Amino acid sequence: MAIRVTEQGRNFYLETLHSMYQIKADEYGVLKHIWYGSRTECDMEYLLDYPDLGFSGNIYEAENKRDYSLDTMPLEYSCKGIGDHRIPAAAITHPNGSDALDLRFDGYEIKKGKYVISGLPAVYADEDEAETLEIYLKDTSSDIRVILKYGVLEKKDIITRSAVFCNMGDAPCKITKAFSLCLDIPHGDWDWVHFHGRHIMERLVERRSLFHGVQESSSNRGTSSHQQNPSVLLCSNDCTETSGECIGALLVYSGSFQTKIELTQLNQVRMLMGINSECFSWELKPNEQFSTPEVILSYSDSGMETLSHNFHNVIRNNICRGEYKQSERPVLINNWEATYFDFNEERLENIAKEASKLGVDMFVMDDGWFGKRDSDTSGLGDWFVNEEKLKGGLNTLVEKVKSYGMKFGIWFEPEMVSEDSELYRTHPEWAIQIPNRKPTRSRYQLVLDMTRQDVRDYLFKVISDVLSSADISYVKWDMNRSICDWYSAELPVENMGEMQHRYVLGLYELLDRLTSEFPHILFEGCSGGGGRFDAGILYYCPQIWCSDDTDAYERTKIQYGTSFFYPISTIGSHVSIVPNHQTGRITPFETRAVTAMSGSFGYELDLNTLSEEEKNAVIEQNKRFKKYGPLIHNGRYYRLSNPMTDKFAIWSFVSENSGEVLVHGMIFRTEPNMTRYSVKLRGLISNKKYVVDGDNTIYTGKALMEGGILLPKPWGDFFPIELHLKEV
């Protein structure tokens, strides 16, 4: 059993293959967090020994027991206003204006299978794969109840967390904080790893020792954002890829989020994760419930690599859904960097025709095909074909592309509207803007109010009409700005704090309707590249365009950071032209291909402009990707270097039985008279023997892991590396 209960139903153990999570309801009904770490087969409460600390108060029932303080003990779900002065996970304003919440244990239930969250994406699992623990809490002085939900996927080393707030009274109250995760860690010296960045430079890895006080990574942009990612690692000071303790937390949510970490006066750590409390409030009416988004947790005592494998496994198998969850992805060509807005049907057909000759599977028509759309200043919202550009209409173009033996994909940006559009002229009230205040433009566009049912119904109809009008196999769903000016005429003024979360709920509802209506279409998420790269979007779209930066060198850093939580199969990555359109950098054609193969492979250029030598290279690259694709997308992924600090970026994919290995990467700079670099492989079997394609030398797994493999001698900067090994 993954969930064990002792001491008359007050001591809870959530056990996976390699971790144990312990909770206890004490004699006062206070729910304490005891342990999250390796399996010890022992009650770990003996470690909790706290002093009578000045200015840390005591609950009333404890009388003069001054060493019993909510301000010092590790709690399972911290609340505001009851003597715990650390950062709270929950706060509610009651009808009388007070905001204290004192939650005490009120029972539990264990259920087979994994809980679901209405209206929100979450990990899913069969009854034989998961168990659910629900712990019931009630406020001591009001009719507020909270259900803490835990999903345990024992064999995957995964625990999930969510909370449900219930108003059992006869008057409304207001939730002002509702974090999904509160994790108190009583002991240890921890580093904080987060993933920051900006547009065309997402998910850069930053590791810092915790300082006393509160540190935070968050987004208030209405999306999970380019600037921070809703993921975090806590690592022991000595933690590396292959050794040391670490805890990973990943929020399954696509809106404004917050991760807060406090190092306390007693050197304890508290970590909160969930909806950004600065962008949130929620009126909870009598007999209503509010559910928080889910957090996925995993623990490793063997370094960050194990943790990444755990998250890759659960995302690939228990977050991603649909036909493309694990199937091969088509090699595609996108016309955006080839044409931008300057195209007609003839130019698109020429790109598709040449691509088909070179082994590309799908042609994707990007921005500019609809409404009056010759630049980014008009047309958004008018999702009907611009027949001045596509004179034969969409179906004619699609059938032409299909005649070349290719599938067809199309770009949308459904959440946006241009002021110069038929939609805005007809429904200006559908755009998010504050009355009597000029809206903030970004990319010269406004945002549609996704909290409105009429907006979602309109988008469902016009997108469905397009997708039904031709044989379309792929949709790129883009979102190209941060959101501000939050206001909706659909909400009472006093409830405007609900809007950001309601926007995300509306987005999920629309995505769910469309992906259910068109199950054979591959949906790819995008937000100016990787501005909404999160597990919430992956529930509807099994891949996300990783970044608008297609520079191969920069992509090694972006994809490195992305890999800590997200599997390679979810990463959209393409070969583009040089000089690169984002950086001006020139990298070898083969290097661009090797880097792009660490994802869902494709091209972002006009293949007609290539030399014959480059076209032959494209044919060869496509053959290799189709050969190695199952290993790349389903194999175990290993980060063999750190491109942020090393002179090269090297990574590998290893088959489940460790009988096949693909090593990819690049050497950044070539120096004269340099010795060859060697890289130690991982994930092999020591006593197995391996041979490299094109080399008759036989290596043992132990030699390759302990001594390493020699990389080819580079010639020129950004030199590509590809080594394929198989068991002899």
Image: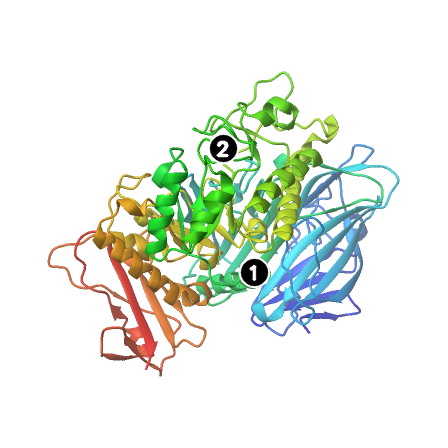
Quadrant where the C terminus is found in the figure: bottom left
Q: Vertical placement of 660 versus 428: above or below?
A: below
Q: Vertical placement of 92 versus 181: above or below?
A: above
Label 2–label 1 contact, CB within 8 A: no
Question: Could you tell me which residue is drawn at 49 percent across and 36 percent down?
Answer: 480
Relative horizontal placement of residue 71, taking residue 418 as reference (left or right): right
Q: Nearer the viewer, residue 92 or 574?
A: 574
Residue 676, given in percent of the width and then of the height, sits at 19, 64
Q: Secondary structure at mark 2?
A: loop
Q: Amino acid at mark 2?
A: Asn
Res 314 quadrant in image: bottom right
Number of the label disc, if any, that sits on residue 323: 1
Residue under numbered circle 2: 386
Does any portion of residue 597 appear in the rendered image?
yes
Relative horizontal placement of residue 547, taking residue 486 as reference (left or right): left
Q: Amino acid at mark 1?
A: Glu
Q: Secondary structure at mark 1?
A: loop
CA gap, disc 2 and disc 1: 31 Å
Question: Could you tell me which residue is drawn at 64 percent across and 73 percent down?
Answer: 42
Residue 79, given in percent of the width and then of the height, sits at 70, 45
Does any portion of residue 545 appear in the rendered image?
no
Quadrant where the N terminus is found in the figure: bottom right
Q: Earlier in the sequence, mark 2 or mark 1?
A: 1
